[in-house]
Image (spheres, grey):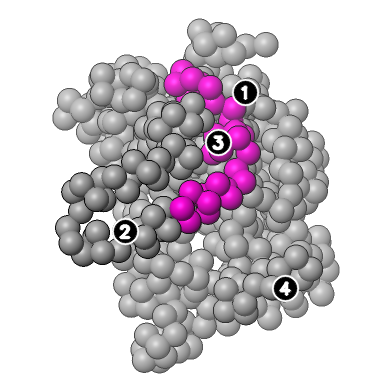
Amino acid sequence: MTLATPSKAQEIRQRIGHPVVDADGHMLEIMPVLLDFLQEVGGSRMIEKWQRRNTGPWEGLFDHGANAGWWDMTPKERRDTGTMVGFWWFLPADTKYRATAHIPRMFYDRLDEFGIDFAVNFPTTAVAFGAIPGLQDDELRQAMCRAYNRYAAELYGPYADRMTPAATIPMHTPQEAIAELEYAVKELGLKVAMFPSYVVREVKREPGNERIPEGRLAPFKLDVFGIDSDYDYDPVWAKCVELGIAPCFHGTANGIYWGPRNSPTNLMYNTVGNFAESGDAVSKALFMGGVSRRFPQLRMAFLEGGVGRGILTFAGMLEFWEKRNPKTMAAELDPARLDLDEMMHYVEQYGEPRIKKNAAAIRQMFEGIKQNEKRVDIPGYDDWYGAQITKKADFRTLYENNFFWGCEADDPTTAWAFADKVNPQRMKFRAFFGSDISHCDVLDPAGVVPEAYELVEHGAITDEDFKDFVFRNAVRLYGGMNPHFFDGTPMEKDARDVLSADGLLR
């Protein structure tokens, strides 16, 4: 679509002279059409299952969520139960914009107006099929994911030269994930996959936990795949490598039962920082669980939370490793090093009268500490055993080219990614541009590229940094897994140049 009067986004695109990739935009599903696909996948019985869930806006999407029932409660009932406020006024109400988000051809025709060369369209409703906290009914969850993936492939397929939809992958078991990955890629031809940041597992009384008091047995736990999982997810990561898929994690910390995100009256209180929190959880699990150690070619994306959280997570892990690596712990933190005779000498020499009065009990306290802390059964007394960290340089090796962070146009912390003079290990982090077009935080889809470019105009990043942000890092993410990802698009040559320069063409 060529505009008679170019938009500001189009002017910026012409000025910078390189492609702009929206690596995380969104579509809005048309539910009657999606249900047509569900009918084809699961028949009338599955339609009935789905319809029985829908008792309020968005509510049918959540199992066991902290906002279940909110719409039908009185204000007092919401406060008394701590039920989190449901999503409200979450989608754009400008008619042309709303139609653009729903109708693939209209979205496609307006890409030039938005200053975007290529767009990756993630789902909206379908995000919740496997996450937030997802559909616990195995049959319905798998059918809804399959129906959505067929919807996305059919409706967006004709526009593959400039935009591509993301498949949604259920992750309650590795088997269901692999089955849907195989189907989405090999049968439907999809080349982007969205994964939940965690799945919710109900905790049941069973052999091995009978002695735990009833009040101490949590009703659920969160499985973040990389550590402490009920399953081995390595076959999923291996399948991603085989199929050329970069797993893109899209979750939220809202609606999962507890803590500081359960306001019954204030959605923004619950929402601010929630994507960052979920990305933090799964990225740490994958790093510390050694996924990038075992699959060095795997590129993983954590969407919408911003690179600021990724940098803080990386820096925090590195700083703690320096104090809590096995060698330092043995030298400085092993309770066996406590000399109780020397300790009691200091008690006698420096203790106030009340301290000296309790000298025998104090010695007993330290004896108990030494005995109890030796009961820790962490392998090798090393929290980093999964990633097999032996030196500081391992952090950069296992992180820099494997962990990519989606940043929205209005996120000023994007500039941190390129601040290599102050970043840990002088690293530039893999930040990439995700517009979040179709959701409430984008009021004008033609405004996202100009808003992102303000980082250059304000001197926060350079033109070369901006090129990494809106173009090269997206190519490294998607093309680094699949060198043919951008084949057949107007930016095919530009993408191949990036991959060639990075040694990623094969």
Give the foreground label among 3 and 1: 3
Q: Is residue 208 visible?
A: yes
Whole-Å distance between the Cαs marked 2 and 1? Answer: 55 Å
Q: Which residue range is magenta in the image?
A: 367-396
Query: Dot 1 corresponds to which residue?
Result: 296
| Proximity of marks 2 and 3: CB atoms separated by less than 8 Å | no
Q: Residue at x 81, y 60 (%)?
A: 41
In the displayed structure image, the side of residue 389 where residue 369 appears, left or right? left
Whole-Å distance between the Cαs marked 3 and 4? Answer: 29 Å
Q: Residue at x 33, y 77 (%)?
A: 265
Whole-Å distance between the Cαs marked 3 and 1? Answer: 22 Å
Is 323 one of the magenta-colored residues? Answer: no
> Residue 428 placed where, x, y %?
37, 22
Name the disc covering residue 210, or none.
4
Among the two numbered marks 2 and 1 on one chain, the one whose residue lies closer to the N terminus: 1
Among the two numbered marks 3 and 1 on one chain, the one whose residue lies closer to the N terminus: 1
